[in-house]
Amino acid sequence: MSPAGTTRAKKAPAPQKTARTAAKKTTTMKKTKSARGPTTRVPAAGPDTAHRMELLEDMLRIRRFEERCVELYSAAKIRGFVHLYIGEEAVAVGVNEALTPEDAVVSTYREHGHALARGITAEAVMAEMYGRTTGCSGGRGGSMHLFDASRRFYGGNAIVAGGLPLAAGLALADHMRGQTHVTCCFFGDGAFAEGEFHETANLAALWKLPLLLICENNLYAMGTALERHEAQTDLAMRATSYGMVAWAVDGMDVEAVERAARQAVEGIRAGTGPHFLELRTYRFRAHSMYDPDRYREKGEIEQWKSRDPISLLTDRMRENRELSDEDVARIEQRITAEVDHAVEAAEQAPEEPVGHLLHHVTSSSARAVG
Amino acid sequence: MGGGRTHEEKTTYREAMREALREALRSDDRVFLMGEDVGRYGGCFGVSLGLLEEFGPERVRDTPLSESAFVGAGIGAALAGMRPIVEIMTVNFSLLALDQILNNAATLLHMSGGQLPVPLVIRMTTGAGRQLAAQHSHSLEGWYAHIPGIRVLAPATLEDARHMLAPALADPDPVLIFEHGSLYNVSGELRPPSEAMDLDHAAIRRAGTDISLITYGGSLPKALAAADELAAEGIRAEVIDLRALRPLDDAAITASVARTHRAVVIDEAWRTGSLAAEVSARIAEGSFYELDAPVERVCSAEVPIPYARRLEQAALPQTADIVAAAHRAVD
Ligand SMILES: Cc1ncc(C[n+]2csc(CCOP(=O)(O)OP(=O)(O)O)c2C)c(N)n1
Ligand SMILES: [Mg+2]
């Protein structure tokens, strides 16, 4: 499933099968149904054309939004660390399909995609990157710390793996109150090396918490390739050692991601505890805007681009004769207008007054106005 | 505390804490206690003994040895509307959860532009004096007092042990409670709280006019003993118990120094970069013209706390050191 040039490609043509089998073997689950990954792709049973259109639009929105971010960064309109999600859009969009508004999401610093997929508007995210009052964190967070309490979006955490314990707590609260909500936590392959991941995996499995662990394995933790930071690179297989259901998924295929996420969420809502999905994906851009990207071969990037999640879907839809050039143009137009509007609004939005500097340090300072 | 207590009946600091926990668990079903060995074992210092039997394993929740995960889980549960009380065995172990405390609990409200308050209480033991050596004895509460966004409390009396928890739970923001290990067995008659128990004010534990002994937590009994000795010599020391290490009650410190014109700050942490340094700096900033003598500090020796009793006691602030410092200021 993955282009050559990586250990993963050398290892197995269909690594998700291995992990899935491992999950089946080691899991303590009774409901084997939820432990089983989808075996074949059945287009007839998949989402209909309208749904695929939505998936396409959601992925394109993230792509175009971030391409604009690059321009704005070069123009010094936005600053700080900015981590692009370009290439990984299928993960955020596919996973979000499985979630309801009552579910909670915990994200990382590479979070524009998660936030937009969750329904935070391009306007609110862009204004945040501009550091404006109208930003989704009132200008305190920037690109790495997007929040929206009303959407149960508990933010961008810039400490690698730092969101995992918090996500377990959100899940614990729902669990204790007998609610069937799921908490979905995104993190990278690099986070798998952190103690906080392993502590949380154990705790969540031990307490059967309704936690969906979404490991975005893009093969790199900054400049360190997976095989240079993990002794055993089959992450899904390792996750099963905690007694939770886990399998690997083609993270470039948005429909495959959606199916897997729905299946995992179904298992979690049925009370069978945390599920782990390893989404095999790739970032097309550098780690952040600061990164000169010297640690990987251009050829590797090009090979992965041949499995661009957006073209993968459009090709499939064109094959099915459910997508025309006019459809694409219409969607692109809508998104351009949306992003244009977000930028204009951010440009015009007021800056947070310096007099508000000490707001939101404690709840009493948060109440202070003026 | 139940009404039928007779006058002679004594309570320990540990029991006062336990009673506070029991009351919190009884009065609000969003409250739960979680930490290592808080349930079946009864708490590593016996504070939560019996609570598992009364409230069950969901609400008195034993955790694996995963400080970061269960402190973080407390933060997440607080975000989702619960009122968790997380117990960490000692402050030395809290360093394994420092990421969660500093990078999440203390920052989420701000980073989210005010959307996400974290109503979490974290309790832990601090301090030396029980020959537990250098990985169980340090006083790092001053580090936490450095952090904006959290409240740091140090109950030093039975009354504070009993009555600080409820307002801490009512606080919408994270509150850290430091219980000095040498206080758990302190026993006495538990008085009803004199005023409404607040978390903002220092307390005058003994009034005086000649010198201010400013301290908190496990050093309070030593400061009071020093005040007794000084009184025998005719020096009337005022003893200020800070109670809250963040935010500091500047007004109480200033008012006391305005009465006495001399101050000794007693802090079991190391002197360098300590809370004692902060208090001294504030006196220099706010009360400079009130001072008749340089501010004195009595802190622990700059050494990892040793095991051997003689060495450990030599490292810690002692009553005699406080008396000597007061003499330097007064003479
Ligand atoms: C605890 C911690 N250590 C180091 C960093 C610096 N850092 C930021 S992102 C990153 C790589 C993380 O890789 P991964 O988890 O795979 O996520 P990705 O960036 O690939 O999405 C590193 C080392 C950090 N932010 N937090
Ligand atoms: Mg990565």
Image (cartoon, coloured by chain):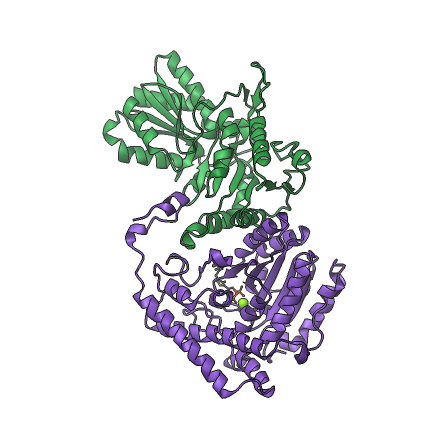
What residue is at 57 percent from the left and 73 percent from the top? A281
Q: Is residue B325 left or right of residue A317?
A: left
Residue A223 percent coordinates (x, y): 50, 69
Q: Is residue B265 above or below residue B134?
A: above
Residue B89 percent coordinates (x, y): 58, 39
Residue B119 percent coordinates (x, y): 49, 44
Identify the image quadrant of residue A188. bottom right
Q: Nearer the viewer, residue B55 or A193?
A: B55
Q: Is residue A341 left or right of residue A184?
A: left
Identify the image quadrant of residue A226. bottom right
Residue B302 percent coordinates (x, y): 44, 36
| Residue A234 appears in the figure | no
Q: How many numbered markers are drawn?
A: 0
Q: Nearer the viewer, residue B167 or B239?
A: B167
What residue is at 42 percent from the left and 68 percent from the top? A122
- Image quarter for ligand 2 equals bottom right
What residue is at 55 percent from the left and 79 percent from the top? A304
Q: Which chain is purple?
A: A
Q: In the rendered view of the protein, which quadrant contains the C terminus of chain B?
A: top left
Q: Is residue B303 above or below residue A248?
A: above
Q: Nearer the viewer, residue A97 or B241?
A: A97
Image colour assigned to chain B: green
| Residue B324 appears in the figure | yes
